[in-house]
C-alpha cells in the first residue's frame, strides 16, 4: 500500500458498553449477548506511568491482534486507568512516520517497514517487542490467463507497494525463477504493478492486472471475484511460518514507560490466547472492528477462507525477518542492513513467563 495519512484518531474505547451495539449492527448481536461468547473485559483501576498510550494498526485481518484486542477490551483491561488512543493507518510508511514524529507510541506493522524504519534511523527510533501474526499472503490469479506458475512470466501482477513485505517476497520469488525485473520500475519479465490493496480488486475485475501477491483479506476478495489461488506464501517457508505482523514501540516511550509497554504486551498475549481458543468468536470480533472502521463487515465468502490462513502468534519469528531483509537486499531495494538491536523481547518474555508460556527468540538480533 502507498503511504497515506493516518485515519481520524478513534476515541478511547469504552468497549464493555459499546461492543454489543457494534456487534448488533454487524449481524453478530445475538452472539454478543451470550456471556460465554465474550472475553472477560472487567476493568482495572491500576495506575501506570502514562495517562495514555497511542497505538497504531491497519484495518487488515493480518492485524487481528489489534482488532480483537481493542474490540474485546483485552488490551484496555491490562492498562487500567491508562487510556488507549487508537490510530488506524493505511500503510507502513505513514505509521513509521507517526512513530518517528512522536505522535505514536506503539504500532502493529509488517516486517519490511519495521526494517526500513530501523535502518533509516540508524537504529535509534524503534524496537520490535513482539510478534502478532504469520502467513495470510497468497498469489491470486485470473485462471483464464494463468494456469501454472510458469505462466506468470509476461503477466501483470500487483503488489501493495514498492518495497513492502509482499513486494519483496514476490521480487524474490521472481528472481528464484530466473526472471529479471527492475525493482524500482517493476518492469521486466514480469510487470510488477504497485497498487493499493483497496484498489486491487477493481483493477483485477477490470482486467488491468492478471493477478496479485497480496495479504488477507484482499486475497480472498480476489477469489470471490473469480480469482484462483496459485500459491500460498506459507509453502515457501520452513515450518510454513513467516512474520507478517510485528508489534513495535518508540524507543523513547519504551525507556520512559516500560510499565505501560508491559501492560500492552500482557493484553496482546491474552488477546492472542483468546483468538486461538475462540476462532469463530474472534473472527466475528475482528469483523465487527473492521465494520466500525469501514462502515460494513466483510462478506462471509471473503472472511471465512481468509481467517484460517492467518496464524496468530506471540513469537516474532525473528529468523524470518532477517531472511526477508536478505530478500530486499538481493532484490536491490536496500543495502545490507545492520539489524542488531532491532528486537527487545525482555518484557514479552517476562509476560510469557508469568503466563506459564515459553520464551521466544530474537535470533541474535536483540538489544544489548
Image (spheres, rainbow, N blue to C red):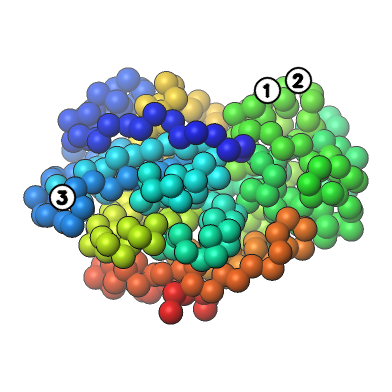
As drawn, the residue found furthest toward the left would be 45
Q: Where is mark 2, residue-wise?
A: 206
Crowding at label 1, few (<14), some or many (≥20) Cα neighbours within 10 Å?
Answer: some
- Which residue does the numbered mark 3 point to in the structure image? 80
Residues under numbered marks 1 and 2 in contact, where contact means CB atoms less than 8 Å apart: yes
| Residue 151 at x, y percent in the picture | 88, 43
From the viewer's perspective, is 290 left or right of 17?
right
- Residue 98, given in percent of the width and then of the height, sits at 44, 44
Residue at image position (23%, 62%) is: 259
Nearest to N terminus: mark 3 or mark 2: 3
Q: Disc 3 versus disc 2: distance between alpha carbons?
A: 49 Å
Residue 283 % position (x, y): 41, 39
Q: Position of residue 4 (x, y in %)?
A: 54, 34
Front one among 256 and 155:
256
Residue drawn at (47%, 64%), measured in percent from left and top?
A: 124
The residue singled out by tag 1 in the image is 202
Pick the front one: 101 or 86 = 101
State the quadrant of the N terminus.
top right
Q: Residue at x 36, y 23 (%)?
A: 26
* Earlier sequence position, callout 3 versus callout 1: 3
Q: Secondary structure at mark 2?
A: helix
Gap in angstroms between the C-alphas marked 3 and 1: 43 Å
Amino acid at each position: 500500500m502507498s503511504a497515506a495519512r493516518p485515519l481520524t484518531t478513534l476515541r478511547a474505547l469504552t468497549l464493555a458498553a459499546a461492543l454489543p451495539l457494534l456487534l448488533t449492527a454487524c449481524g453478530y448481536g445475538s452472539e454478543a449477548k451470550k456471556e460465554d461468547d465474550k472475553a472477560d473485559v472487567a476493568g482495572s483501576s491500576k495506575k501506570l506511568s502514562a495517562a495514555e498510550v497511542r497505538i497504531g494498526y491497519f484495518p487488515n485481518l493480518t492485524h487481528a491482534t489489534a482488532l480483537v484486542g481493542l474490540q474485546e477490551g483485552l488490551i484496555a483491561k491490562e492498562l487500567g486507568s491508562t487510556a488507549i488512543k487508537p490510530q488506524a493507518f493505511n500503510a507502513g510508511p505513514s505509521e513509521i512516520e507517526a512513530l518517528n514524529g512522536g505522535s505514536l507510541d506503539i504500532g502493529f506493522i509488517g516486517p519490511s517497514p519495521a526494517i526500513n524504519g530501523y535502518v533509516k534511523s540508524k537504529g535509534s527510533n524503534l524496537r520490535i517487542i513482539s510478534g502478532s501474526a504469520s502467513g495470510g499472503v497468497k498469489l491470486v490469479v485470473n485462471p483464464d490467463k494463468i494456469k501454472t506458475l510458469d505462466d506468470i512470466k509476461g503477466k501483470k501482477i500487483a503488489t501493495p507497494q514498492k518495497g513492502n513485505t509482499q513486494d519483496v517476497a514476490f521480487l524474490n520469488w521472481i528472481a528464484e525463477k530466473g526472471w529479471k525485473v527492475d525493482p524500482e520500475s517493476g518492469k521486466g519479465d514480469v510487470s510488477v504493478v504497485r497498487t493499493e490493496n483497496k484498489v486491487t480488486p477493481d483493477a483485477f475485475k477490470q482486467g488491468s492486472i492478471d493477478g496479485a501477491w497480496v495479504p488477507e483479506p484482499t486475497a480472498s476478495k480476489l477469489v470471490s471475484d473469480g480469482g484462483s489461488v496459485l500459491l500460498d506464501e506459507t509453502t515457501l517457508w520452513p515450518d510454513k511460518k513467516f512474520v507478517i505482523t510485528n508489534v513495535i514501540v518508540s524507543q523513547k516511550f519504551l525507556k520512559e514507560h516500560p510499565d505501560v509497554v508491559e501492560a500492552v504486551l500482557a493484553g496482546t498475549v491474552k488477546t492472542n490466547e483468546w483468538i486461538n481458543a475462540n476462532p469463530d468468536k474472534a473472527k466475528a470480533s475482528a469483523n465487527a472492528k473492521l465494520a466500525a472502521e469501514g462502515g460494513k463487515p466483510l462478506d462471509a465468502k471473503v472472511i471465512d477462507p481468509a481467517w484460517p490462513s492467518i496464524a496468530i502468534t506471540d513469537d516474532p519469528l525473528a529468523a524470518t525477518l532477517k531472511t526477508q531483509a536478505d530478500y530486499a537486499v538481493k532484490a536491490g531495494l536496500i543495502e545490507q542492513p545492520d539489524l542488531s538491536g532491532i528486537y527487545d523481547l525482555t518484557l514479552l518474555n517476562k509476560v510469557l513467563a508469568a503466563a506459564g508460556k515459553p520464551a521466544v527468540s530474537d535470533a541474535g538480533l536483540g538489544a544489548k
